[in-house]
Image (tube, rainbow, N blue to C red):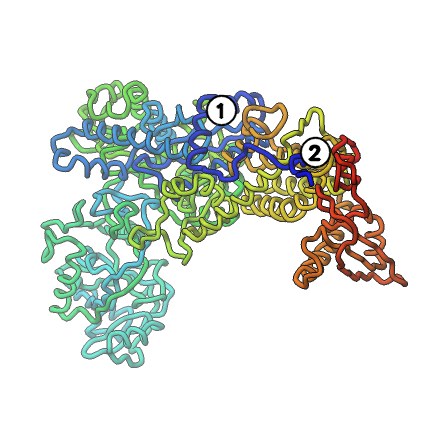
Amino acid sequence: MADWKDSLNLPRTDFPMKANLQTSEPQALARWEEMDLYGRIREARAGRPKWVLHDGPPYANGQIHLGTALNKILKDFVVKSRTMAGFDSPYVPGYDCHGLPIELKVDRELGAKKRELSPADFRRACRAYAERFIGVMTDEFKRLGIFGDWDRPYLTMEFKYQAAIARALGHFVRKGLVFKGKKPVHWCIHCRTALAEAEVEYEDHSSPSIYVEFPLAPESADELGRRIPTLAGKNVSVLIWTTTPWTIPSNLAIAFHPEFDYGAYEVDDRIVIVAEVLAPSVAAVAGKTFGEPVARMKGVVLEHIRFQHPLYARPSLGVLGEYVTLDAGTGAVHTAPGHGSDDFETGVRYGLDIYAPVGPAGHFLDTVELFGGQRVFDANPRIEEALKQRARLWHREDFSHSYPHCWRCHNPVIFLATSQWFIRMDGEPVIRPSGDASGPRALRAAGLEAIDRDVKWIPAWGRDRLFNMLANRPDWCISRQRAWGVPIPAVDCARCGEAILTADLVERAATVFDQYGADAWYERPIEEFLTPGLTCPACGGAEFERERDILDVWFDSGSSHEAVLPFREELTWPADMYLEGSDQHRGWFQSSLLVGLGTRGRPPFREVLTHGFLIDVDGRKMSKSLGNTVLPQEVIKESGAETLRLWVAMSDFREELRVGKQILQRVVEAYRKIRNTGRYLLANLYDFDPSRDMVPLTAMQEVDRYALARYADAALEILDAYDGYDFPTIFQRINQMTTVDLSAFYADVSKDRLYTFAAGATARRSAQTAMYVIADGLSRLLAPILPFTSDELWRHLPGTRLPSVHIAEFPARADLQALTDRDLVARWQRLIAVRDDVNRALESARQGKTIGNSLGARITLTAGGATGALLRRYEDDLPMLFIVSQVSLQATDGGADTLAIDVARAEGYKCARCWRTVDSISSSPDTDGLCERCVGALGGSQAA
């Protein structure tokens, strides 16, 4: 008997089954580079509506990590999807080149050699370090398939950018919002610099918890007796609690809440004052017996009463503070105005010295009695011992709590009052919101209003996070005691030390920076930065020294919208979106918002999208010490960048994102299924020319129209999901379409027509038309997520088309709507449900050896009611639907909706070509053993 295999239309394609992404992805990158794909995309979208995502600049200080890859991939999803939605959506990447992360790396590289360098030489070393890693990071971002203007990224160390930072500061100076003052700030004693709120991370920490007695000062004994007669002539003390013993030498006051009830308790040989509701817990901790109070008083009664410092011969003033709580401690709060925000405000209100006798490295000044020269944290046990020797330490224990740490070196920080530059958050209303005629606002108030009025937050909780942070933040400390950044262009009077910063001084510096960069501040004569006739407003002096502090790097990056968006013709101000991790509510989102309000009266973004951080499969934070980190470079080497991109799409970015080897292996399997489905579609289009062979929708087989309707429903949902940045839904719908609608059903029932019908048969072309439309749409819909695979699929599709899918657009909604058909889908889903029942019956018959494969089966359906009517309507399609040779349909009596299935061996002859069992086969020498349909197919019949 003849071998008819060569007469079949078996699938064939050059699209490889094995992706080999490690090789194919770099090849695609080289091809895109050669054709200037990004430039061609820009040309194709010229004149379209703009949609701009402004890039938050990562630090140029090392290879990318998985969190950086996640962030860039999400941005790429957004930009590519907006581009394919028809927008002109350019992407200008940026790099943050200033700041402590780079400075510390250069410090380490230079070692002792740093001491030989001038500030300008050290800055040049920092610039060179950043330039080195800009190239490294750019290559790694491009390897991820990120499209952008990589030849022209914006750099915060560019001269024009540095000038723009200075000019942004000038707006605040002009509005009177910048001042220099001595205030407590977070201070890292290891990095020796002030820290912004965004540079502080809270970590678990164990601190000494101590209860300390402050006796009544003799000079206040009579006054206390007049206010509380029962305490007249008594030995009175107050008890405080603190977890920072090292601040006791700086104590100047004790704060009481004006409305709280305090009790005076007789303990041993004295009377001790604590908050009444806390007395039982204090007694239990201290191992003392507290009876009924001998006197009760409101906190307000103790205002201005002086107590004696437990270590030094100086008083500690009784003050009032609404911030005092009853959550823990004694209700009496140890107050050191130089070491806490509330303490500082209280100290100013009561005219106390802002006393902070601690140097930049965290050592007590030599003037501090008992502890001079000691490092503050090391001094804790010595301070406890001194208190104990004076019988002032009631109790001591270790206390575990969340404590601020430096974001860079991860060491505990201190609050330290130093002379710093600040931007005032409250006070005189000078911010005029754009488009709001109701009058100016203070900076904080303007920001809180803008958060609700001008911005869409994705997810919605991002609004609350930033709103609460902005509502409770202190004045913005914008000065840093470092070398690598944009200098604050202020001068100090050489005669009296008065600090001077004016808008004219700032603009003069910006003009110099435009030409020479910010290094000029350290190298060029100071006269170039002084305005003509400048004199000191305090003493009239005319000689000046330049400020040595630099600007907070969050002001640098927060000014990026001023330095980049107005000066790149392809961009717009404001940007449509900022997209970063959830830590940037404290950082870039907030600094950008404040700078935007200061320069233009509105936020520089319309939407803010926030993503979570990475955790391992057990829910633990990624950490080198735990050994659970995943390096993007290793994932790419093992399974390609598409694996990382699909993992991002499969994950809900609104929450913490889990990742690990097992998760990535599941991603690889999901990718393989998508790829194989695409390959199957392509393989059945090898002889299909869309310009010649497309079948009109109205002439297509109904099962093909069902496949197109299911594809259109999925595609419309995917387009909606792209609009809503709902990438997991996109993956789920693509996964369902490829594995369920296509692989498990449509590909299965179409094989007979595709393989055995005449090549040009209308029924076969109908199936090919559906597969072509689906494959074309799938490549477009996948493009933002799987750019390499979608472009590979696109290039293997038949017909004339654009050189890359990334120049094309998503399927048009109108075209998709024309393919939808709810009634048709409902009918076929009912048919598929019957098919599922039949498949179960076939499997049972296979297990019982009644049949071999399904083409050897005869199905008898006995059906009534709606099911019977549906099956009669589609009786001719049932063999195709069930992939069997024969189907017999019998009606039941009555109107009940019933279905019975009987499986038997088909009777007749097996066609040697299509393997169906038929009533008769040909005996002609040329077609011996073939059924009538196959004979027609070989003769070119369009019906078979």
Q: Is residue 557 visible?
A: yes
Depth check, front residue: 11 or 156:
11
Q: How many neighbours does mark 2 have within 10 angstroms: few (below 14), some (14-19), or many (20 or more)?
A: many
- Above or below 133: residue 749: below
Q: How many neighbours does mark 1 have within 10 angstroms: few (below 14), some (14-19), or many (20 or more)?
A: some
Question: Mark 1–mark 2 contact, CB under 8 Å?
Answer: no
Q: Earlier in the sequence, mark 1 or mark 2?
A: 1
Q: Amino acid at mark 1?
A: Leu
Q: State which quadrant residue 292 falls in.
A: bottom left
Mark-to-mark CA distance, 1 and 2: 29 Å
Q: Is residue 826 visible?
A: no
- Which of pointers 1 and 2 indicates the residue nearer the eye? 2
Residue drawn at (34%, 46%) of the image: 197
Residue highlighted by disc 1? 37
Return the x and y of residue 568 as percentages of the image width and height. Answer: 45, 23
Residue 769 is labelled as 2
Return the x and y of residue 106 as percentages of the image width and height. Answer: 22, 35
Residue drawn at (31%, 28%) of the image: 157
Return the x and y of residue 369 as percentages of the image width and height. Answer: 10, 56
User: The residue tagged with tag 2: helix, strand or loop?
Assistant: helix
Depth check, front residue: 861 or 289:
861
Is residue 556 rendered to the left or right of residue 385? right
Q: Quadrant of the C terminus?
A: top right
Residue drawn at (20%, 79%) of the image: 268
Q: Amino acid at mark 2?
A: Thr
User: The residue tagged with tag 1: helix, strand or loop?
Assistant: helix
Residue 514 is labelled as none
